[in-house]
Amino acid sequence: MTAPAPAAAPPAKAWKAQTRIELLLTLRRGESVLLTFLIPVVLLAFFANVDVLPTGDGDPIDFLFPGILALAIMSTALVSVAIATGFERQMGVLKRLGATPLTRRQLLGAKTAAVVVIEALQVGVLLIEGFILGFRFSAPSLGLALVGAVLATVAFAGIGLLMAGTLPALTTLAAANGLYLLLLLVSGMVFPLDELPSGLQAVAELLPSTALAQVFHGALGDATVPTSAIVVLFVWAVAAPLAAARWFRWE
Amino acid sequence: MLRTATTLTRMPALEVTDLVITYGDTRAVNGLTFSAEAGEVLAVLGPNGAGKTSTIECLEGYRRPTDGRVRVLGLDPIAQHDRLVPQIGVMLQSGGVYPGIRPIEALELHAAFYADPADPTELLARVGLTHVRRSSWRQLSGGEQQRLSLALALVGKPRVAFLDEPTAGVDVQGRQLIRSTVRELAQDGVCVVLTTHDLDEAEKVSDRVVIIDRGHLITVGTPDQLMAAGGSREIRFGAPPGIDTAALGKVLLAAVHETSPGEYLVETDPSPGNIAALTSWLAEKDLPLADIRAGRQTLEDVFLRMTAITGEVPAVRIDTRSKDSAKARTERLRGRRRSA
């Protein structure tokens, strides 16, 4: 039955199977679903109905919806990728895959595809919720939002992989969750940036999470998109994956 | 005991030449040379920390040799990684599988990496995991995880399979299943390299044994050759505990020791005459004979003797016999070395 007949499968077949399993396992992990779907959905519903945030005179949903969308992207591309990859590394999954014909490029491609699919699902769910809660687009520039989302995804995934590839899995787990909470608070996603002390605000503006929130607020709402936000995202999108490629350890 | 490989032209499936692996100041592997052919089961045997895994990981392409040369199917495992990986199957010492994945999903995933894989459902049945096909990896017992790891190593129909401690933590049935699978692979012409510190396993499953200790090659040979080597002048037998060894010694004109309760060692030539004298003495006393072994050591004896040469006797786990007997034998060997 297993008389030798070795050859690699066509690259597309391996990539597809790997993508499928990445998606399946992500959606099967309760904590991942909690983080990527439940928390953004609950935060949006809660703060849209409980007017405690200093979101200005308008309907809070107009400020919250783009911010929560940015949060959702961050939760998948940074936190979920970091935690999952960290444990895959610790459990020897990456090592074992390294002895199969699946190439690193195919593995990375599969992880990317899985992230994109999850993000699309998140956006779909949040769009429906946003509309139910009364969010309406006013002359959105979807192209700009898409550029921001792509750059941010690359930047976040780079940071997530850098953590996963250098720290022990449990440290990555703790650090990624801590980072999630910190960035949620200081990045202008839920609390407007100008409510922060000026020193903190200056630092926050250099973060990819802040830049993504600014891009979404501008592109999907009434604000203007600062050029600096695109520059910040671009720099992170180049630097973080390079750092990950440089320092990532497979075991 | 020696099994003949049935198939294919004999070719070196792997070659290790003067392999040296260092970690910082430590030489984990020091000038190792051996090879294996298609259709052969090679057991790399040694105590913990002997350098078994380091050596295997060089062959798998995980580790770069500090010095020396390794070739698998004529390929450099690191430089020609892409050409080699479709042809090898790897079973890591532990882990390697997504904690949340189900056995059938894991097999289907790995099958998708190969052009002509084995059928995942059939393979799952072959390693006896059909009943847990819907459980996740983390829910499987240690033995079930090992069997799934073995199946994953075979799903690509490899020409060379590397199994690192395949039966560690596996129950008796699981161990037999893994052994029979290994034998079938060899019959199909696959070169199987397995590491073990279980002497019984090496004796039962392998065509040839490489014994290493602290990074050094101690010896290579078939289990039969190794066990015959030295042609020990002794008779071992099992009988009820507490027989009168002094009286028996007078009859046989040799020292008789009870190495552990009910296990006896006679320091004399295993000639038919001596064996006849032994058995008739037992018959006179109406003592039943449990077993008798003459002129042939177990691999365990060889191992302890061989590894003892390089220094202190290493800690070895022995599955088949009681620890007492191993200890007694070790002490005897030490005594013999001192007197030599």
Image (cartoon, rainbow, N blue to C red):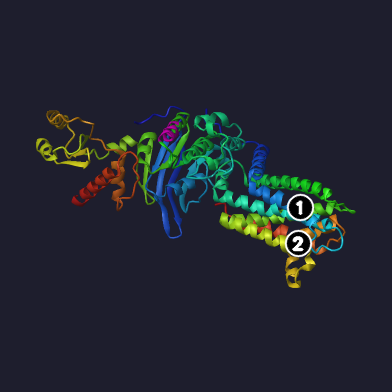
* Chain letter of disc 1 in the image: A
Residue placed under numbered mark 2 in the picture: A210
Of A73 and B25, the residue lying toward us: A73
Of A93 and B42, the residue lying toward us: A93
Inspect the image, locate mark 2, and give the three-letter code of the amino acid beneath it: Thr
x, y (%) of residue A127?
81, 48
Decide: is A204 above or below B134. below
Residue A153 located left or right of residue B284: right
Residue A12 located left or right of residue B325: right
Residue placed under numbered mark 1 in the picture: A150
The residue range painted magenta reads B172-180
x, y (%) of residue B340?
19, 49
Decide: is A101 above or below A197. above
x, y (%) of residue B196?
40, 42
Decide: is B332 above or below A248. above
Say if residue A7 shows up in the picture. no
